[in-house]
Amino acid sequence: MKKILVTGVTWFIGSHLALELNKRGYDVYGLIKPSTSRDTKKLAYFLKDTTVLTCNVSNYQSVNHVLKGVDPDIVVHLASLS
């Protein structure tokens, strides 16, 4: 099974993408910002089968740590500053 890492998984496109990828049988990992103020409980339906990890995508060590730990086949980068 392919592992897909999605940054920005708590936003509209990222959460819907994670849901669709899970439906298609992919092993999905989603990144959230460490100090996020978003209520992920509201996204429980979209992220129920997603492994959610904390990562600061603007920090090399944080991203490197996640990439080594997950070893994804595909990365979909949707994180942005709001």
Image (spheres, grey):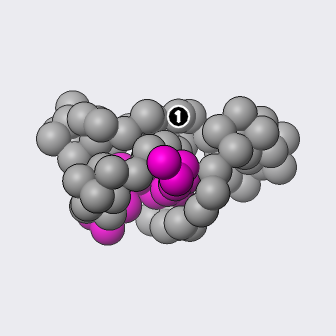
- In the image, which residues are magenta? 1-14
Determine the image quadrant of residue 24: bottom left
The reply to whether residue 59 is in sight is yes
In the foreground, 71 or 59: 71
Determine the image quadrant of residue 13: bottom left
Question: Within 10 Å of the Cα at label 1, are there few (<14), some (14-19), or many (20+) other Cα atoms?
Answer: some
- Residue 25 locus on image (x, y percent): 33, 51
**Which residue is found at the position 83% from the left and 49% from the top?**
60
Residue sticking out furthest to the right: 61
Residue sticking out furthest to the front: 1
Question: Relative to 66, is 16 above or below?
Answer: below
**Quadrant in the picture for the C terminus:** bottom left
**Which residue is found at the position 65% from the left and 39% from the top?**
70
Left of 56 or right of it: where is 80? Answer: left
- Residue 5 locus on image (x, y percent): 54, 52
**Which residue is found at the position 63% from the left and 57% from the top?**
73
Check if residue 13 falls in the magenta segment: yes
Check if residue 15 falls in the magenta segment: no
Label 1 belongs to which residue? 53
Left of 34 or right of it: where is 51? Answer: left
Question: Relative to 42, is 22 above or below?
Answer: below
Give, as a three-letter code, the residue at label 1: Leu
Question: Relative to 61, is 19 above or below?
Answer: below
Element class at badge 1: strand
The reply to whether residue 11 is in sight is no
Left of 1 or right of it: where is 13? Answer: left
**Which residue is found at the position 71% from the left and 33% from the top?**
69
- Residue 18 locus on image (x, y percent): 34, 55
Q: Tell me how many marks there are.
A: 1
